Image (spheres, rainbow, N blue to C red):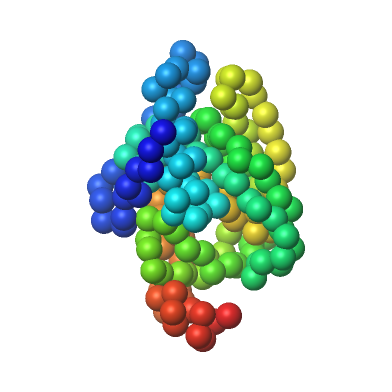
Amino acid sequence: MAVRRVLNMGHPLLRQVARPLKATEIGSPEIARLIDDMVDTLHDYGGIGLAAPQVGAGVRLAIIEIAGGPTRYGELEPMPLTVFVNPQIEVLNAQTAGYWEGCLSVPGLRGFVERPRHVRVEYLDLHGEAHAMELQGFTATVFQHEFDHLDGKLFVDRMNDMSQLSFEREYERFHL
């Protein structure tokens, strides 16, 4: 297990579409090592989600862990560390909600992004078993943000108004 360097905006790997994992790869030692490294990296960097392309692996894999409790986004339901293999998102309600997003690959910046507020996620777990869940509000935003990385997208690509892009210090001073 190791902490990997998170790639920053501008690195070409962040703009590539990740390939799906084959069934034979899901339980492999290489993918297990990647996941262990991603968990170490997520904890070291202090994020709530991390996609494989952010650490230089071009596969459709992401991890999310939400501590839960009161946050600036309201009360969040906790989510234990979960691995999402080949996830797919379906929008269930196109009505949007906007949040100030940050990203480990875009350090020091926050941007206001509006996304669908109700989605369904289908994915495989570490054993290749299929799962589905419905998500709403900020949690739905977290999933869309992380899974965008699998399609070569960053939150700045989803912004409607670039005047809502701010350095973190100014965000805390003027937008909190």
Image x and y of residue 7, in percent: 31, 50
From this view, report whether residue 42 is shown above or below residue 96: above
Quarter the C terminus occupies? bottom right
Residue at the (47%, 69%) spot, across then down: 111
Residue at the (44%, 79%) spot, across then down: 169
Residue at the (31%, 55%) spot, across then down: 8
Q: Going by the image, does 79 lie left or right of 128?
A: right
Image x and y of residue 114, in percent: 56, 64
From this view, report whether residue 130 is shown above or below residue 6: above
Q: Residue furthest top?
A: 24
* Relative depth, front residue between 19 and 173: 173
Q: Going by the image, does 153 lie left or right of 74?
A: left
Quarter the N terminus occupies? top left
Image x and y of residue 27, in percent: 50, 18
Residue 140 in sight: no
Residue 125 in sight: yes
Q: Going by the image, does 74 lie left or right of 159?
A: right
Residue at the (47%, 33%) spot, across then down: 36
Q: Residue furthest bottom?
A: 174
Q: Going by the image, does 12 lie left or right of 128?
A: left
Image x and y of residue 128, in percent: 58, 20
* Relative depth, front residue between 149 and 47: 47
Name the image quarter holding residue 20: top left
How many marks can you see?
Answer: 0
